[in-house]
Each structure stands twice: as C-alpha cells, then as structure tokens.
Image (cartoon, grey):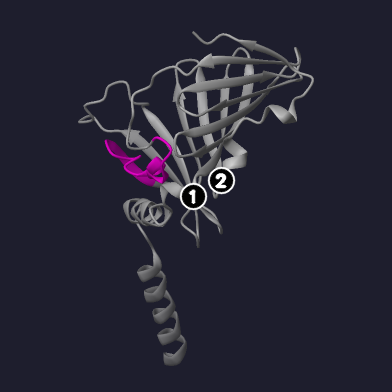
Amino acid sequence: MKKLIAIIGFIALTTAVMAQTAEEIVSRMEAEMSKHNESEGFAMTMDIKVFIIGTISSRSYVLGDKMRVEANRDDNQFITWSDGKTDWTYDSGKNEIEITNAKPKEKTETDGDTKLFKGITDGYDIKIDKETATEWHIRCKRSKSNPDKDAPKRMDLVVAKGTYWPVSLTTSVTAASVTMRDISFGVTEEQVTFDPKKYPKATIVDKRQ
C-alpha cells in the first residue's frame, strides 16, 4: 500500500510540474515562432465570416515585400500578387489580369515577418479555457488597462501541444469574425512572383499611372 501511495504521489507531483499557465504557453509559442526568420517567408489561411454574406477564405503567401493572396468567390478565383510597388490581380471569371500601382501602406514590425504572433496577447487577460489531448484553447479578454480601445474585446487562441505552434487565432469585430489558421513556413520566389506566361490567354488591363 505504501508503494502504491508513493506511486500516486509521484504521478501527481509530475503532473503538477508539467502543468503550464496560459502565459507560459504563449511565451513558449512566441519563442518557437521566433526561431524562423524573415528570409523563409510564411503562408497563412484567413477566414472572414460576415454574418449576412457568409465565410470568405483566402490563402496568403508572404516573402519579404512580396505577397500572393488567393481567394474564391461565387465560383470565381481571384489571385493578387504584389511586390510592394505593383499589384497584379487575376479574375478567372473575366479571364482578366488588372495591373495597378500598389497602395502605400505603413510598415510595421510584423509585415512579411515571422513576428506575426509576437505580443499578440499584450493588453489581454488570458486563461486556458479548454484543454484537449493535442491542444490548448486560450481565451483572451481585453484588459481594462488596454490603451487600444479599437482592439477586439475577445480573442480565442489555439496552441498545439508538443510543437507550441499556433493552430488558429479567432477575433470578432463588428458583424464579422476573423480566423487565422494553417500557418506554415517556407515560401519560394516563384510562389509570390507574377508570371504572365502562366496566363497566356488572359486579357491584360494596365491601370498604372
């Protein structure tokens, strides 16, 4: 009996040591993400659920200043390539490629960068909402002290056990919810560079000024 009690006590102690707080999990996630550098590039799927329209999904590939975004709507495929100066947008329904000047954007520390999830929970009170055999589900509630009043009131972060990679991040905004998921690293120049040879029959509409 004493041996059984000792084994139970050892298991309980080991389990307690292995238990982690939401803050520790997020910190480990950020550390794992920081192992990847900007030169690798990353890909990510984004689901935008508009309560009246439905869900629009897109897949983005980012490498430095270059990016490609793919989306489907009403059985049409839309692909946009950008190198920071020029945008090329393909519409499969029209079989048309529109070329425009890229819109200027503010450069942030997360643009084209694997710091995408760094500090994502800053200004939020976080706790483990649910735990499965493979994932931690972390609820993030905007802190009263958060100076950014435009920040979402709530976010739901899912982190994979073992790898500590983010599985998904869901936020809610007015009349819509946004989910980032399926994050991967390793993007090639070919994936983010527009090649007109692949669309020989498409009509080119050049709107650059």
Name the foreground residue: 4 vs 13: 13
Vertical placement of residue 136 versus 10, above or below: above
Seen at 32% across and 37% down, the residue is: 109
Q: Position of residue 63 (x, y in %)?
A: 49, 40
Task: Report the amino acid beneath label 1.
Answer: Glu
Vertical placement of residue 85 versus 168, above or below: above
The residue that disc 2 covers is 187
Secondary structure of the residue carrying numbered label 1: helix
Query: Would you say residue 54 sits in the magenta stretch?
Result: no
Q: Position of residue 151 (x, y in %)?
A: 33, 26
Seen at 74% across and 30% down, the residue is: 198
Q: Which residues are magenta?
A: 111-127
The residue that disc 1 covers is 40
Secondary structure of the residue carrying numbered label 2: loop
Seen at 40% across and 53% down, the residue is: 29
Image side of residue 64 versus residue 191, left or right: left
Whether residue 129 is visible to the viewer of this picture, yes or no, is no
Task: Report the amino acid beneath label 2.
Answer: Val
Farthest residue in the right direction?
Answer: 201
Question: Crowding near pointer 2: few (<14 within 10 Å), some, many (20+)?
Answer: some
Question: Crowding near pointer 1: few (<14 within 10 Å), some, many (20+)?
Answer: some
